[in-house]
Every structure is written in C-alpha cells, then in structure tokens.
Image (tube, rainbow, N blue to C red):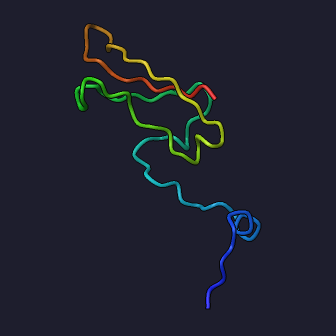
Amino acid sequence: MFGLYTADQIDEMFDAPRGRGNQKYPWHDMERGMSFFIKCDEYSENYRGPEVPVGLAEQGFVVTREKRPAKGNGPDHIVITRVE
C-alpha cells in the first residue's frame, strides 16, 4: 500500500533531484558574466533563444539575450549571458 504525502513532506524526506535534464546548453556550468551563443540561421527569425530551465530560474538564475552579428559582416547570433 502507498502513502500520500504533501510537497513539503517530500522535501523533508528527500534531497533535490540529481538530474540536470537536457544538457544541450551549458546552463549548469555558467557563472555570472559567462555567455554562450547560437547561430540565428539555425532557427526562425524571431527566435529568442532557449529558456532557462525551471529549476535554475526558481533559484534566481537570470540571463539576457542579444541578437548580434559576427565580426566582419558575419551571420547573426543570439548571445545569452548570465546576469544573476
């Protein structure tokens, strides 16, 4: 037979999950001030970049996004920088 528990009870009994989900982007390795970029031509014109994973956002992880051309009249990129 299974018991039912509230979210608070589960938090008291267990540590946070170890998994980091999708590792396509280096979210968990970013320190404040670090950036990564994505070529815009790989996505739609209005693409803003990937969203911060929910768990990190809940911990105060904040990024800025800038659409910037590469030097020498190169293709546009989305530069994602951690600010918090």
Q: Residue at x 25, y 31 (%)?
A: 43
Q: Nearer the viewer, residue 4 or 17?
A: 4
Q: Nearer the viewer, residue 49 or 69?
A: 49
Q: Is residue 72 above or below residue 40?
A: above
**Quadrant of residue 4 within the rendered picture:** bottom right
Q: Residue at x 36, y 15 (%)?
A: 68
Number of callouts in the render?
0
Residue 16 in the image: x percent, y percent?
66, 60
Q: Residue at x 77, y 66 (%)?
A: 12
Q: Residue at x 69, y 68 (%)?
A: 6
**Quadrant of residue 45 within the rendered picture:** top left
**Quadrant of residue 47 within the rendered picture:** top left
Q: Nearer the viewer, residue 11 or 31?
A: 11
Q: Is residue 12 above or below residue 22?
A: below
Would you say 77 lies left or right of 54 here?
A: left
Q: Residue furthest bottom?
A: 1
Quarter of the picture containing the C terminus is top right
Residue 8 in the image: x percent, y percent?
73, 63
Would you say 34 lies left or right of 66 here?
A: right
Quarter of the picture containing the N terminus is bottom right
Would you say 5 lies left or right of 63 here?
A: right
Q: Is residue 47 above or below residue 59?
A: above
Residue 36 in the image: x percent, y percent?
44, 30
Q: Residue furthest top?
A: 72
